[in-house]
Image (spheres, grey):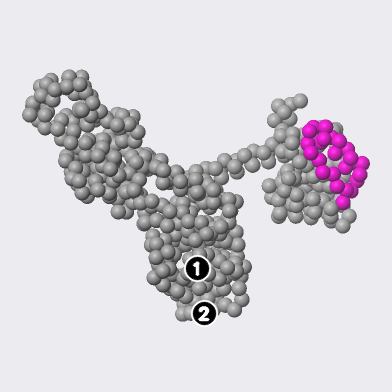
C-alpha cells in the first residue's frame, strides 16, 4: 500500500450511482474492500434523493443514465453539497465531456471499463484526502475567527468568568439576548462572541447603532424601503434585517429607538416578517436578534419610554456586563493585553508596565470603561520612549489618580473594594516612605536601611519592588505583584 493510500480516511462515505448493475457491484466491492462506507444506487433519480444525505463525503456518478444524466446529478450536488467531491465515470469518453465535467466541479473523470481495480480506489483516495484537508482547514479558520472575536473579552474576575460561561451557554440557542452595560464595557464584543460560537457563524453578523440614526433613516436602514416611499428614495432598498437573513443582527443602544420603530421591531420579533417602508407585502426573515443598551430598560419601561411587550420579547436572556471600576483585578490583565496589541501594531520595543504606572491605572475610575483603558494604553505606547510604560506616559487625569506614585487620597480609592483600596494605599505609603529615606540619605542605601531598621539586602528588595532609586521591576515580577501576590511590605521584615 502506498503512503498516499495509508493516509486516506477509511471511514469516508461514498455514494455510487450507475445504472449498469455489474459496474455498480464491482465499484461497491472495490471500495468496501478499501474500508469505505458505500451507498450503491442504480437509478439517477434515487441518487438525487440520496445526495441530500449530509453524511455523504464523496460520490461516483455515471454520466449516461436514463431519466437524469450524471451531469445533471453533478450540478445538483455542487449546488446543494459543494463540499462533496465528485468523480464522473463513463464508457463513452470524449475530451468535450471531460472538460464539461471538470468545469461543472467534478474532481476527476474515469473511463469504463477501468484499466485495473486500483484506478477507482486511488481516485477516491485522492478525493478523500482533498476533502479531509479542506474540512480541516475550514475548522481551523472558524476556530481562528471565533478566537479573534473573543480575544478582547479579557478578564479573570468572578463577574467576567460568569459572563464567559453565559456566552458559551446561550450561543447554541436561537433565543433573543439583551446585553446591558455602560458604554465601553464591550457589549458588541459579547454579541460577536455569541454569533461566532453559534450555528449561524457562517452567516452574516450585522451591527447597527440605533442612536446614531434619525427616526426615518433608522426605519429605512432596519426594514428597507421601496422606491418613492419618501423624498430621496429613488430605488428599492433591502433593509438590514433582510441582509442578516440566516445570521444575527446586533441592535446597539436599542433604548434610543422611537416608539413607532419599537412597534415595527416588535412585529419582526413576533412574526419573523419585515415590511419595507412604503411596501404592502411582507418578507419572511430568519434572524437572531441580540440587543444592547447602556440604559436600564426595566426603568425605561416603568417610565413609559420603552414598550413593555417589546422589553419582554428582548429580555429572554440577559447578559449584564460589569463596569471596569467594579472589577479592578482585571485591570492589570487588560493593560498587558492592550500593551501587547499596540506594541505589535505600532512596532515599538516595550516589554512591560512599571508598578507605579500600574498603580495609577488600577486607581483610576475609568468612566469610559474598557474602551477608555484601551485608548490610554495606545496613547502610552505611542508616547513612551523607554522599555516600559511609566507614569509619565499616562494621561494627566490617570497620573493624578494616584498622585504619580505619591500619597493616595482616600476619595481616589473609594470606588474600589476595601481590600483592594487598602493594598494600594499601603503600597503608595511605602513608596513615599522609601523615597523620603533615600532623599535624606542622599542615595546611600546602607544609611537608608539603617534608618529604616531593615537589613541592607531586604531594603534593596523593597527598592526594587517599589521602583525607588531608579530601579524598575521585571515583567514577571510586575505580573506577580499586580495580579496574584502581595508585594513585600515593611512590616513583613524583622526590624
Please state the horizontal and vertical placement of residue 237, each as a whole percent of the image: 54, 71
Q: Is residue 349 visible?
A: no
User: Image quadrant for the C terminus?
Assistant: top left
Quadrant of the rendered image containing residue 349: top left
Quadrant of the rendered image containing residue 268: bottom right
Badge nearest the viewer, 2 or 1: 1
Mark 2: secondary structure: loop
For residue 30: magenta?
Answer: yes
Please state the horizontal and vertical placement of residue 457, each as a whole percent of the image: 20, 19
Q: Which residues are magenta?
A: 19-43
304 with respect to 407 (left or right): right
Q: Is residue 293 visible?
A: yes
392 with respect to 138 (left or right): left
357 with respect to 264 (left or right): left
Residue at 69 percent of width and 50 percent of height: 82
Residue at 74 percent of width and 34 percent of height: 10
- Judge whether 194 appears above or below 132 on screen: below
- Judge whether 204 appears above or below 455 on screen: below
Structural crowding at the residue carrying mark 1, measured as other residues with C-alpha within 10 Å and reported as few (<14), some (14–19) or many (≥20): some
Report the residue marked by disc 2.
Answer: 229
Instruction: Give the mark nearer the N terminus: 2 vs 1.
Output: 2
Quadrant of the rendered image containing residue 422: top left
User: Image quadrant for the N terminus?
Assistant: top right
In this view, the residue in front, 90 or 166, is 166
Q: Which mark is residue 310?
A: 1
Amino acid at each position: 500500500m502506498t503512503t498516499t493510500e495509508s493516509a486516506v480516511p477509511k471511514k469516508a462515505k461514498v455514494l455510487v450511482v450507475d445504472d449498469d448493475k455489474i459496474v455498480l457491484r464491482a465499484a461497491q466491492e472495490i471500495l468496501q474492500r478499501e474500508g469505505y462506507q458505500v451507498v450503491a444506487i442504480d437509478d439517477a433519480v434515487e441518487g438525487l434523493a440520496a445526495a441530500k444525505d449530509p453524511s455523504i463525503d464523496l460520490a461516483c456518478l455515471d454520466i449516461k443514465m436514463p431519466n437524469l444524466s450524471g451531469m445533471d446529478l453533478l450540478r445538483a450536488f455542487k449546488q446543494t453539497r459543494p463540499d462533496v467531491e465528485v468523480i464522473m465515470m463513463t464508457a463513452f469518453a470524449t475530451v468535450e465531456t471531460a472538460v464539461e465535467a471538470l468545469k461543472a466541479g467534478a474532481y476527476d473523470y474515469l473511463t469504463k471499463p477501468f484499466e485495473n481495480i486500483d484506478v477507482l480506489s486511488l481516485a477516491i483516495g485522492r478525493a478523500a484526502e482533498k476533502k479531509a484537508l479542506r474540512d480541516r482547514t475550514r475548522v481551523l479558520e472558524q476556530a481562528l475567527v471565533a478566537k479573534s472575536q473573543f480575544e478582547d473579552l479579557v478578564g479573570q474576575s468572578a463577574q467576567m468568568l460568569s459572563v464567559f460561561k453565559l456566552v458559551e451557554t446561550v450561543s447554541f440557542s436561537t433565543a433573543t439576548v439583551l446585553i446591558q452595560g455602560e458604554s465601553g464595557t464591550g457589549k458588541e464584543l459579547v454579541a460577536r462572541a455569541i454569533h461566532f460560537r453559534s450555528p449561524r457563524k457562517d452567516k452574516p453578523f450585522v451591527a447597527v447603532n440605533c442612536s446614531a440614526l434619525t427616526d426615518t433613516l433608522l426605519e429605512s436602514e432596519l426594514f428597507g424601503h421601496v422606491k418613492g416611499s419618501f423624498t430621496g428614495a429613488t430605488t428599492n432598498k433591502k433593509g438590514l434585517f433582510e441582509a442578516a437573513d440566516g445570521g444575527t443582527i446586533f441592535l446597539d443602544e436599542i433604548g434610543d429607538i422611537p416608539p413607532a420603530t419599537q412597534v415595527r421591531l416588535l412585529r419582526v420579533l413576533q412574526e419573523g416578517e419585515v415590511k419595507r417602508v412604503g411596501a404592502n407585502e411582507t418578507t419572511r426573515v430568519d434572524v437572531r436578534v441580540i440587543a444592547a443598551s447602556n440604559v436600564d430598560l426595566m426603568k425605561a419601561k416603568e417610565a413609559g419610554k420603552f414598550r413593555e411587550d417589546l422589553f419582554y420579547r428582548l429580555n429572554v436572556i440577559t447578559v449584564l456586563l460589569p463596569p471596569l471600576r467594579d472589577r479592578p483585578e482585571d485591570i492589570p490583565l487588560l493593560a498587558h493585553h492592550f500593551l501587547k496589541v499596540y506594541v505589535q501594531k505600532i512596532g515599538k520595543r516595550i516589554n512591560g508596565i512599571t508598578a507605579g504606572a500600574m498603580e495609577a491605572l488600577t486607581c483610576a475610575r475609568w468612566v469610559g470603561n474598557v474602551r477608555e483603558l484601551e485608548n490610554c494604553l495606545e496613547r502610552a505606547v505611542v508616547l513612551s520612549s523607554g522599555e516600559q510604560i511609566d507614569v509619565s506616559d499616562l494621561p494627566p487625569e490617570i497620573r493624578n489618580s494616584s498622585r504619580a506614585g505619591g500619597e493616595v487620597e482616600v476619595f481616589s480609592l473609594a470606588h474600589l473594594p476595601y481590600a483592594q483600596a487598602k493594598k494600594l494605599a499601603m503600597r503608595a505609603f511605602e513608596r513615599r516612605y522609601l523615597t523620603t529615606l533615600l532623599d535624606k540619605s542622599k542615595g546611600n542605601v546602607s544609611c537608608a536601611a539603617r534608618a529604616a531598621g531593615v537589613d541592607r539586602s531586604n531594603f534593596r528588595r523593597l527598592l526594587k519592588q517599589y521602583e525607588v532609586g531608579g530601579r524598575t521591576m521585571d515583567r514577571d515580577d510586575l505580573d506577580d505583584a499586580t495580579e496574584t501576590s502581595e508585594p513585600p511590605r515593611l512590616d513583613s521584615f524583622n526590624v
